[in-house]
Amino acid sequence: MEASVVSFMWIAYQIYFYMILAYVLLSWLPNARTSFIGVTLGKLVEPYLSIFRKFIPAIGGVIDISPIVAIIALRFVFYGIEAIIKLLIP
């Protein structure tokens, strides 16, 4: 049971990680964030990223490193929940 829960969480983590990555890469293409995919990813990813953007200003007003910090934080959350599951489910 533990392995299936952790496997599901790992898949969910990977999907969200790649959604954040795709959203960041869309910022490099002109008008890509206004496409259907860009808008959809924005609705799913932007609420999470906005938490980090409040505390981490863009470097020089241009380079936004908050997605990097958000991905690292997401990874720590995954490992924390995984440890709790391993303690609770024998």
Image: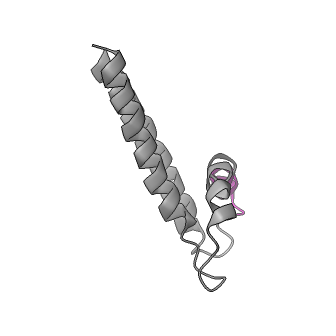
- In the rendering, at what x and y percent does residue 33 appear? 67, 64
Regarding residue 65, the answer to whether it shows in the image is yes
Magenta-span inclusion, residue 45:
no
Magenta-span inclusion, residue 41:
yes
Q: Nearer the viewer, residue 26 or 88?
A: 88
To which quarter of the image does residue 9 belong? top left
Vertical arrangement, residue 24 with respect to residue 73, above or below: below
Regarding residue 4, the answer to whether it shows in the image is no
- In the rendering, at what x and y percent does residue 41 appear? 62, 51
Q: Nearer the viewer, residue 10 or 87?
A: 87
- The quarter of the rendered structure image containing the N terminus is top left
To which quarter of the image does residue 11 belong? top left
User: Looking at the image, how many numbered discs can be counted on the residues?
Assistant: 0
Q: Is residue 69 left or right of residue 11?
A: right
Vertical arrangement, residue 70 with respect to residue 83, above or below: below
Q: Residue at x 64, y 46 (%)?
A: 44
The kind of secondary structure the magenta stretch mainly shows is: helix
Q: Which residues are magenta?
A: 34-42
- The quarter of the rendered structure image containing the C terminus is top left
Q: Residue at x 52, y 51 (%)?
A: 19
- In the rendering, at what x and y percent does residue 80 appear? 40, 37
Q: Nearer the viewer, residue 1 or 35?
A: 1
Vertical arrangement, residue 61 with respect to residue 80, above or below: below
Q: Residue at x 65, y 76 (%)?
A: 30
Q: Nearer the viewer, residue 23 or 49?
A: 49
Vertical arrangement, residue 8 with respect to residue 37, above or below: above
Q: Is residue 72 left or right of residue 90?
A: right
Q: Is residue 62 left or right of residue 19?
A: right
Q: Residue at x 45, y 42 (%)?
A: 77
